[in-house]
Each structure stands twice: as structure tokens, then as C-alpha cells.
Image: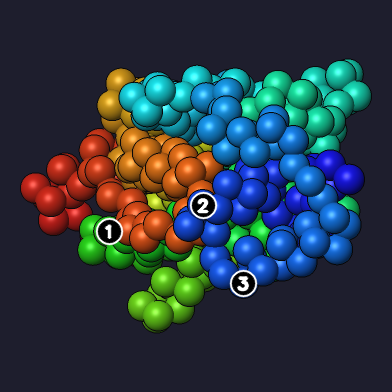
Amino acid sequence: MTIQEIAQKSGVSVSTVSRVLNNSPSVSPKKREKIQQIIDEYNYTPSVFARGMVNHTSKNIGVILPDITNPYFASLFLEVQNFALKNQYATLLFNTMFVRHQLQNELHLTEEDYFKMILEKQVDGVLILGGNIDKEDVSDSFIHMLNQLQQRVPVVIVGSKIEGCDCLFIERNLKQGVTSIVHHFIALGHERIGFIGGEPGIRITTARIDAFKHSLQVLNKPLDERHIVTSDYYAQDGYSAMNHLLHTSADHLPTAVIAINDMVAIGAIRAMRDRGLDCPADIAIASCDQFLQSNYSIPRLTSLDQHNEYLGRMAVMQLISAINGSEEMLSINHSPKLIIRESCGADSDAATGHSFR
């Protein structure tokens, strides 16, 4: 019997078993009793190495994300890396390219393969910033793999909590920001508002579209399903989504559109310009996710600041806390902030009193 087998039978991480062997007070009585029962049942005698594991850490954190070329994940990873370094932890990046399906198929690697690679690197904990965990229909086998990983090392996921998953979660507020954009457009006088971007079947897409529909319903504003066009999260997707919208709703175009992120917004504005339309004069645009380039596009994008610095810091704090033996969930207070710039037309409309109806 090994310490790894004790951890597996107990349903905990190896480091938790090691803390029990070292009489650490950081393990809950219930969990300690369960582990001790298995130790006694198998008459396990720990080696010097096993007892010392609690004090022998690699000071490495594994970080899994689906696409480092996506500005959201790139900026979030930089914040994670910076805060980890301040706490004397190095970060090992694993870019699964889950979103870029073609590249993923060429490599023939799954996220489960990355889990195995991470454990070979002997990391102290794992941060998952997105990927398969963001799907609406997360498979039982994938959740099982996550739980197995959690038994070996602490795992923190930035995303919506999944039933049956034992990992710790840092949850973003996906709905509040969309509601603030809808209210902002209504205040500017818009009656016909659309939504573009986001891959179908992904939690963030569904949550934001649901929030969009709910906000219009609460405000007694009309909803035209033709004005909702899903695609993906990149500029080319915004371009195709806006072209589709302009084609299918030519007789009844929205006067304002919410894009799921800045890349989609930039692609949408390009599609408008290619058809001789102006943003915001013809269609105003605002984005649900602000990237660094938001203030340098033409027009400057009205966007939601998702506070990636805060999210990255809290994710690392939660993981380090778990590595050190704490089972307490940190209190997360995250609400996006709407940054008003040119693409929504707020400045010019405020001056002219123009109403979009």
C-alpha cells in the first residue's frame, strides 16, 4: 500500500493524507477519521518520504487554458502568473487549443492527456481557466477525470460550478454585465437590440443570451429572435454574424447590438463598414468582454471590464490556500463594470437627444 493508494481510497489528495500522517490541524475531523480508518485497515506504515511530502513542494502551479491567442485567456493568465510569482510559485502553461478545433485534431491530444502531463511535472496544484469544463453538457467521464486529478493535487476552476465535480470554483458573474448594457442602450433610446457571437452549447454563451432576453422582458421591450446570431468568439465570427444579421433582417435591423466580446465587436464593425454602414450612427455596439485593444479601435469600444486582475488573484489565492491545507472557500465578490466609449454613441446622442426607435 502506497500513500497514493491511500489517497485514492479516501477520495482526497496525496498532500491531505500526508498532512494526516504529520498530525496537521488543517484537515477536518471527518476527513481525518476516514483517512485514518483506511490507514489502520491496511496497516499502512508511512515512509520518511511520505511523512515529509507535506513539506516538500515543487512550488509549481499547472495552468490549463483552451486558447492562449484569445485575449481574455491571455490577460487572465498574465494576472495568474504575476500573482503566483509574488507568492514564490512558478506557472507551467498548458494550452489545450480546445477552441481551435483544427489544431487540436492535428495534435490528437485531449484535455485528459494534459492532466497526465501535468502530474508528470509534479505540480503542487492546478488552475483550469476554461475548456471542456465550459460546455453545457460536460461528460461524466470528464468530471471523473477532474475528480481523479483533484485527489492528487488541489484543483481550482475559473468557471461555473458543475454538479458532481469536487474541485474548487471561482465563478464569474455572467449575467449582471449584460443587463447593464441593455439598460444603457435603453437609456439611449434604443428599442431594437440584437446579440451576436458566442459558440452554441457553451455556458457563457447561454448565460449571456438568457440575461439579454430576460432584461428585455423585464423592461417590456421587444425581442426579435432574428437579431440573435451565435457563431464563436473571434473577429471573423463577428464579421460573419453581422453579415448574417444584415442579410436576414434587412427590413427591420436592430439599432444596437451586444457582442459577446471585443473581437466579435471589431469583426462586426468591419462587416458594417464593408456594407457602407457606420457604427454607432447606423448600429451602436457594446461588448461583454473588454480587451486591451478596446480603447484603440475605431470607434473606441464600449465594453465590460471583467476585472481579470481580481479574478486571477483570487484564483491563485484559492489554490495556494488549498495547497496549504485549507478547505475553506474564499469569498468572491466579482461584478463587471461597463466602460462607456464611442461605439455605443453615448456622447453624440447625449448632446443631440437623438432617440433610436
Please say whether residue 238 is visible from this viewpoint.
Answer: no
How far is mark 3 from mark 1, CA to CA?
50 Å
Residue bearing mark 3: 30
Give percent across and percent down for residue 280.
Answer: 32, 40
Q: Earlier in the sequence, mark 2 or mark 1?
A: 2
Give SS at disc 3.
Answer: helix
* Left or right of residue 95: residue 7: right
Task: Specify the label residue 184 is tagged with.
Answer: 1
Classify the position of the N terminus by image quarter.
top right
Instruction: Please tell me how crowded label 2 is: few (under 14), some (14-19), or many (20+) other residues with Cα within 10 Å.
Output: some
Please determine whether, in this image, residue 271 is positioned above or below residue 224: above
253 or 241: which is nearer to us? 241
**What colour scheme does the image use?**
rainbow
Identity of the residue drawn at 51% across and 52% down? 24
Give SS at disc 1.
Answer: helix
Identity of the residue drawn at 90% across and 24% down? 108
135 or 155: which is nearer to us? 155
250 or 115: which is nearer to us? 115
Residue bearing mark 2: 24
Classify the position of the C terminus by image quarter.
bottom left
Looking at the picture, which amino acid does disc 3 mark? Lys
Q: Earlier in the sequence, mark 3 or mark 1?
A: 3
Please determine whether, in this image, residue 207 is positioned above or below residue 107: below
22 or 215: which is nearer to us? 22
Give percent across and percent down for residue 46.
Answer: 75, 42
How far is mark 2 from mark 1, CA to CA?
53 Å
Identity of the residue drawn at 54% across and 59% down? 27
* Left or right of residue 105: residue 148: left
